[in-house]
Image: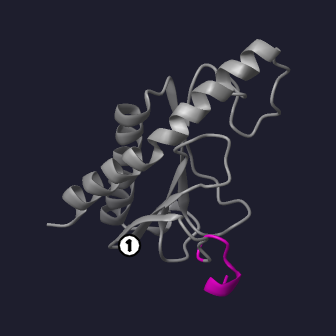
Amino acid sequence: MSPSACPLCALKPGQLLWSGVGIQVLAVTDSPFPGYTRVIWQDHVAEMTDLSDEQRQHLMAAVYLVEQTQREQLGTAKINLAQFGNQVPHLHWHIIPRWKDDPFFPDTAWSPAPERTAKQQQSWSSHEERLREQLSDYQQALRTALQARFIH
């Protein structure tokens, strides 16, 4: 797949949080989960086993760092990690923060949203608003952690 045809190469404004050797870290801005982040291997490869052991360790260190920063900054109930690439042959990991009152919990982020009461919807709306106000702090903490870990 050419970079011009790849949706993971064609970044939208405000998506790129950090870029380093071999990886990019992106904010997923069109998600109902505040703080949803992707870690992308910059070269077009489809599978983790296309990478060397060292490259896999490097990539996963970034994934784990994003997870840890989400837990510390966003008060999550759970973090979902996913690596699919079924539609885009470009290795990437989804790091999705979850809360017990989010519209899909306890199901997956890709499940149909269950029916919710007005009170449940209002609870999540209030919580989501507070989380979105925290995003710039989360993103700055993430940049700082990535810079400290990967730039020596």
Q: The residue tagged with tag 1: helix, strand or loop?
A: loop
**Residue 104 highlighted magenta (yes or no):** no
State the image quarter where residue 82 is shown: top right
**Residue 6 highlighted magenta (yes or no):** yes
The residue depicted at 53 percent of the width and 54 percent of the height is 93
- Residue 16 position in % (x across, y down): 48, 67
Identify residue type, mark 1.
Gly
In the rendered image, the residue lying farthest to the right is 115
Dominant secondary structure of the magenta stretch? loop
Q: The N terminus appears in which quarter of the rendering?
A: bottom right
- Residue 41 position in % (x across, y down): 47, 68
Task: Please report the bounds of the magenta region as a residue range.
Answer: 1-9
In the rendered image, the residue lying farthest to the left is 152
Depicted 45 relative to depicted 131: above or below: below
Q: What residue does disc 1 label?
A: 22
Q: Is residue 48 left or right of residue 127?
A: left
Q: Is residue 39 left or right of residue 22?
A: right
The residue depicted at 66 percent of the width and 86 percent of the height is 4
- In front of the other: 30 or 8: 30
Q: The C terminus appears in which quarter of the rendering?
A: bottom left
The residue depicted at 64 percent of the width and 20 percent of the height is 101
Residue 2 appears anywhere in the view:
no
- Residue 47 position in % (x across, y down): 55, 63
What coloring was used for the rendering?
Answer: one colour
Depicted 67 relative to depicted 115: above or below: below
State the image quarter where residue 146 is shown: bottom left
Residue 23 appears anywhere in the view:
yes
